[in-house]
Structures are given as structure tokens and as C-alpha cells.
């Protein structure tokens, strides 16, 4: 069963004088439960692809199906609903809100979904415990180490039980110990059934994936199965 299917996905950015082709026809199929790493040199289109898969940006041309639904045919409002209900985002720079506590940051996606206060409290506590940051619930992001901030970000990304997590260089700002910790957490979420698509420069992070997709100049040039990990159906 496919969660994502793209066909000839293209993206051009047009500024005053320059036209940049960021994606030049990407055909990508991702099965439910898979863990896919997207690699490639700087500027090859990784972030653009992740943003389009995450419905944060629109392709210029081509088809994107999310769980069988053609996204080009969905309205902006429907896309926002799919995003809130099904997707979780993890970024290199954590993207936490400095003015909110750990607990409040993690609860945000549930606020957008209109989840009740008591249910929010229950789910936020569960997410904090899973990520080992419950002892920091009342702290603000700036009072935490990078590793802790990323664990808060993962808790926020998963509190709404998304079917797909999109991670853009999740260990890019972490030392190797905390980076491995974050990768282990993503891996655990994947083993529990969440599909993970991650952009990374790090070959050791890519080891956690079932499959590595290599982009070059906006196209998939090679794909490698990680033989040390079994691929889920
Ligand atoms: P990567 O994540 O692999 O570094 P990006 O997806 O960020 O690559 O960028 C792909 C190409 O698109 C690059 O040439 C980049 O300069 C260009 N690009 C990305 N975002 C924009 C934008 N908002 N406006 C114009 N060009 C962009
Ligand atoms: P602090 O600065 O509060 O000690 P750390 O980031 O060093 O915070 O983490 C505290 C402890 O919790 C560390 O021993 C760390 O390895 C551990 N830890 C990290 N992730 C988890 C987790 N998911 N579940 C439980 N414990 C964790």
C-alpha cells in the first residue's frame, strides 16, 4: 500500500530574471511503513521535494498522490486538513516557539485540530514521556540542549499520531551522541508503523533508512536498498 506516489513531479522557481529548475521530473513511490532517506548534493532539490511531499509547497507540474488522493485536485483547505491530520515535520533548526514552554510547544498541533484540553494534556504527557523530556515540561526551548530541543520537536511532530513524518536534516545541528539518539527515536517511531521520509547529508543517519534515494539536479539518479534493514510491506 502506497502512502506517497509522485509522477513526473516538477518544480520551477521564477524570480525577476532567473528561472531555476529545482525538480525535473521525480517519480517516487513510498510504501506505508517505509523509512526513506533522500540524499544528494546541496541545491539538488531535496528540501523542495520534502516541502512538496509535506504539502507546504505546490509542484509546477506533475502528480502527487497522498494515500491515493490526487493532491493537485484538492483545495487549499483540504490540503491544510490532510497536513494537520496526517503529517508531522521535524527540521534541522528545531523550529520551536521560544515564548512557549516545552509542554505548550508539543500541544500546538492538537490545538490546531481542536482537541479538548484534557485529551491534549494526556497526549502531550505521553509524547513527552516517549521522548524522555517530561522532566523539562515547564522549561522554554532556550533552556534546553540541542538534543533536548530536537526531542521536543519530535514529540510535537508525533503528538497528533501522523501517518507520515517528514524530517529535513534532523541531526544537522546535533553532536554525534545526540544525533544518534534522535535517529534511534525516529527509527522507533518507524518500527511502530509511522512512515518516515528524511533528507540527510549524513551516511550514518541514512543507515537507519530502508531505502536511500539519491537526487541530482532535480532528478532521482539512483536508489539503494539498505540490506541491513528489512523492508516492510
Ligand atoms: P537542497 O535541499 O538539495 O539543497 P533545494 O530544494 O533547497 O535543494 O534547492 C533546489 C534549487 O532550487 C536550488 O538551485 C535553489 O537555489 C533553488 N531554490 C530553492 N528554493 C528557492 C526559492 N524559494 N526561490 C528560488 N529558488 C529556489
Ligand atoms: P539533561 O541535560 O536534562 O540531563 P539529556 O539530553 O542529557 O538531558 O537527557 C537526559 C537523560 O535522558 C540522558 O541520559 C539521555 O540519554 C536520556 N534520554 C534521552 N532520550 C531519552 C528517551 N527517549 N527516553 C528516556 N531517556 C532518554
Image (cartoon, helix red, strand yellow):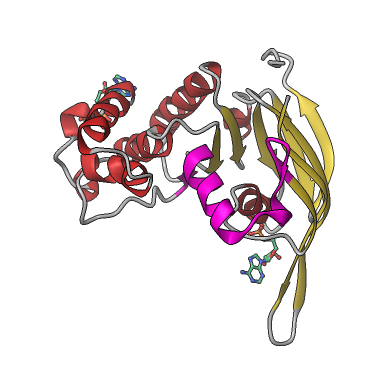
Query: What is the span of residues highlighted in magenta in the rendered image?
Result: 65-92
Residue 102 against residue 58 in the figure, above or below: above
Which of the pair 65/31 is nearer the observer?
65
Residue 46 at least partly seen: yes
| Residue 200 forms part of the magenta stretch | no
Which of the pair 109/16 is nearer the observer?
109
Residue 145 against residue 99 in the figure, above or below: above
Q: Write the residue at 37% across / 33% down.
A: 159
The tally of labels here is: 0
Which of the image's four quarters has the N terminus?
A: top right
Residue 88 at least partly seen: no
Percent of width and height locating residue 90? 47, 43
Left or right of residue 111, residue 36 in this image: right
Percent of width and height locating residue 132? 28, 24
Left or right of residue 34, residue 81 in this image: left
Q: Quadrant of residue 174?
A: top left
Q: Quadrant of residue 190?
A: top right
Amino acid at each position: 500500500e502506497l502512502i506517497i506516489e509522485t509522477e513526473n513531479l516538477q518544480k520551477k522557481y521564477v524570480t525577476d530574471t532567473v528561472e531555476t529548475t529545482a525538480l525535473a521530473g521525480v517519480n517516487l513511490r513510498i510504501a506505508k511503513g517505509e523509512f526513506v532517506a533522500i540524499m544528494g548534493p546541496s541545491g539538488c532539490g531535496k528540501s523542495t521535494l520534502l516541502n512538496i511531499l509535506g504539502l507546504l509547497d505546490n509542484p509546477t507540474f506533475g502528480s502527487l498522490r497522498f494515500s491515493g488522493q490526487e493532491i493537485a485536485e484538492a483545495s487549499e483547505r483540504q490540503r491544510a486538513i490532510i497536513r494537520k491530520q496526517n503529517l508531522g515535520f521535524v527540521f534541522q533548526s528545531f523550529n520551536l516557539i521560544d515564548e512557549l514552554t516545552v509542554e505548550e510547544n508539543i500541544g500546538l498541533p492538537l490545538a490546531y485540530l481542536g482537541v479538548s484540553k484534557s485529551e491534549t494534556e494526556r497526549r502531550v504527557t505521553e509524547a513527552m514521556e516517549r521522548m524522555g523530556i517530561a522532566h523539562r515540561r515547564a522549561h522554554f526551548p532556550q533552556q534546553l540542549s540541542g538534543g533536548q530541543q530536537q526531542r521536543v520537536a519530535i514529540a510535537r511532530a508525533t503528538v497528533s499520531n501522523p501517518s507520515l513524518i517528514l524530517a529535513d536534516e534532523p541531526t544537522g545541528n546535533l553532536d554525534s551522541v545526540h544525533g544518534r539518539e534522535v535517529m534511534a527515536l525516529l527509527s522507533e517511531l518507524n518500527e511502530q508503523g509511522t512512515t518516515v521520509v528524511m533528507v540527510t547529508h549524513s551516511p550514518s543517519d541514512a543507515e537507519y533508512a530502508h531505502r536511500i534515494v539519491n537526487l541530482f539536479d532535480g532528478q532521482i539518479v539512483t536508489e539503494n536498498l539498505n540490506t541491513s534493514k528489512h523492508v516492510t510491506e
